[in-house]
Image (spheres, coloured by chain):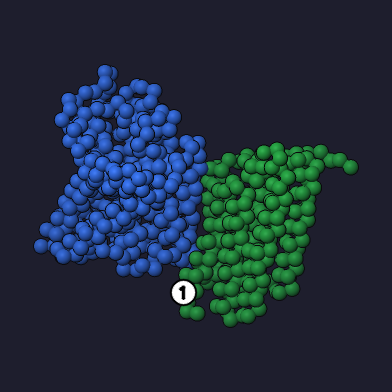
Chain colours: A blue, B green
Amino acid sequence: MSTAVGYAAVAGQVVLVGAGAPVVTGWMRQVRARLEGRAGAGVLQPWRDARKLLRKEPITPVGTGPAFRTAPALLVATTAVAAALVPLLSTDTPVSSHADLILVVALIALGTMALALAGLDTGTAFGGMGASREMTVAALVEPTILLSVFALSIPAGTTNIPAIVSGAAHEPARLASPAGLLATAALAVAVLAETGRIPVDNPSTHLELTMIHEAMVLEYAGPDLALVELGAQMRLTLLLGLLSSLFVPWGIATGSSWVALGVALVLFAAKICLLGAVLAAAEVFWAKVRLFRVPELLAGSFLLALLAVTASYFLSGVS
Amino acid sequence: MSGGLYTQLLDLACGAFLLAAVIVLWMRELASIVRVFALQGIALAAIAVLLGAHEERWDLIAVGIGIGALRAGVLPYLMRRALAALTQDRRRYADGGAETRETQPLVNVAASLLTASLLTLLAYAVARPLTALHPTPATHALPVGLAVVLIGFFVLVTRRRALAQVVGFLLLDNGITATAFLATSGVPLIVELGVSFDVLLAVLVLQILTTRMREAFGTTDIDDLRELHD
C-alpha cells in the first residue's frame, strides 16, 4: 500500500512539473504584465504557444549534427528525472534513497551542457557566443548550488535530499541558523542565474549584446523549439520547487498516506505560485546586470554559500 | 539565558559580523560601505553584550554598549562627514561620482570575493588548534574574528581611495576586538578604553589627512602619493 502512494507521489511530481511548468511561466508573465499596467495574455498562453509550435514542420539547419537534434529531448528528459528525484511532494518514495544531491545537480548540469553543445553545433556566431556565456555562468552556478545544499546537509549528516528535507521539517531551528539564512540567499541567486531570470539574463529579449539562453536556442524551430521552451520552463519550476522544499519544507508528506499527499500537492502549488509571483514582482523593479558584472554577482553568491558551509561546520560545534 | 538560545544568538551575531565584512568588499559606493560598517559595529556590540549576559559580567555589557556607540555611531558619523566634505565642492566639476566610489580596486571585485572565501578558510584552518584547546560556543566562533582581520588586511592592501582604506583599517580593528572577546571574554577595561581612543584618534587624523590630500592633489587616490616632498 505504501509503495502505491510512493509511486503516485513520483508520478505526481513528474506530471506536475511537466504540465504545470508552462502554467507557472504564464502566471509569472501575467503577474508582471499586471504590475506594468498591461492586460497580459493569460496564464495558459505558454501552452497555446507550445500547441502552435508542435503543429509546425520540424526543420533543422543545414550542417547540424546529432548534438543539435538530441539536445531538446535530453534537456526535458534530465529535468523530468530530476523532478522525480527531488522531494517536491513526498520524502518517502521508492526512488528517495537514490535522490542524492550530487546526482540532482549533475542532471541539471547535463541539461545545460546538452543545450550549450547544441548551440555550438549550429556553427553560427550567436550559438557559440550564447554557449560560451552559458558555460561561464554555469561554472560559477553549479558549485554554488552544491555548496549551499551542502551547508544544509551537514546538520542532517547526509547528502540525500529527502533526508535533509524531512530533517528540516522536524527541526525548524536548523533553518534559522546563520548557515541556513546564508544558504537561502546563495541558492536564490544561483536559481535566478541557472534559470536565466532577470538580474543575469532577460528571458524576453533577443538583443544580441545581452542574451545568453536565447542565443543558444536561436536556431530551433517547430516542435524542437517547443521542447526547448518546455525544458526551460520545467527547470524553472523544478529549481523553485527545490528552493521551497529545502527552505520551507512544511507540508511535504513524510509518511505514506493519501491525505498527506493531497495536502502536499495543494501546498506545493501554492508555494510555487507565491514564489513565482514574488520573483515576477521583483523583476519589475530590477534592471539586468551588465554582462561583465554577472561573474561578480555569482562570485558573491558562491562566497555566501561557502560561508554557509563553514558556518554550519564550525559554528554549530560539530567539529 | 539558556544555553541553546545563547549559542544561536551568538552564532547569528558572528554570522552578521562576518557577512558585513564580506559586503564591504562587495560594495563600490563609499556611502554604503560606511553604512555596512556601522551595521558591523552593531554586530560586534551584540557579541560583547551576549558574552557579558552569558557570564553575568556587567562590565563586559558596559564595554559592549560603549563599543557599539563608538563603532556604530561616532566612527561612521566622522567618515560620513569626511565623505560629505569630499563631495561638497566637487559638484562644480560634475565628477563628484569619482570621489565617492571605489571605481578601480587593484584586484577586481569578483576576484576579491573569491579571495575572501580563501581567507575565511585559512582563518578556520589556523584557528582549529585554538578551538580544540577549550571548545565552547565562543571559541567555536573564534575563526570569524580572524577571518575579519584577514579581510580587513585585504581591503587595506587592494583599495585605492583613502576612505576605503580607513574602512579597511577599522575592519582590521573590529576583527581584533572580536577575537579578543571570543577568545578571552574581553581584555581589561583600561586596555579596551585605550584601544578605543586610539582608533578614534586614528580616524580623526586620517580624516584631516584625507582633506589635506584632496586639497593638495584634487583626489584621494592613494596611488598619487608616490614621491616625498618637503
> Is residue B45 visible from the viewing direction of this image?
yes
Query: Looking at the picture, which amino acid does disc 1 mark?
Result: Leu
Asked if A93 appears above or below A79 in the picture, the reply is below
Q: Label 1 marks which chain's residue?
A: B
Residue A298 in the image, given as x and y percentages of width and height: 46, 44
Residue A302 in the image, given as x and y percentages of width and height: 46, 48
Asked where in the image residue A151 lies, by quadrant, the reply is bottom left
Residue farthest toward the left in the current orientation of the protein:
A1
Counting every numbered tag in the picture gives 1
Asked if A278 appears above or below B158 in the picture, the reply is below
Could you tell me which residue is drawn at 66 percent across and 53 percent down?
B167
Q: Residues within 10 Å of mark 1 (few under 14, many from 20)?
A: few
Asked where in the image residue B160 lies, by quadrant, the reply is top right
Could you tell me which residue is drawn at 44 percent across and 29 percent down?
A209
> Is residue B179 visible from the viewing direction of this image?
no
Relative to B73, A289 lies left or right: left
Residue A30 in the image, given as x and y percentages of width and height: 29, 46
Could you tell me which residue is drawn at 63 percent across and 55 percent down?
B34
Dot 1: element: helix
Q: Which residue is mark 1?
A: B5
Please identify the quadrant where the N terminus of chain A is shown.
bottom left
Asked if B188 appears above or below B161 in the picture, the reply is below
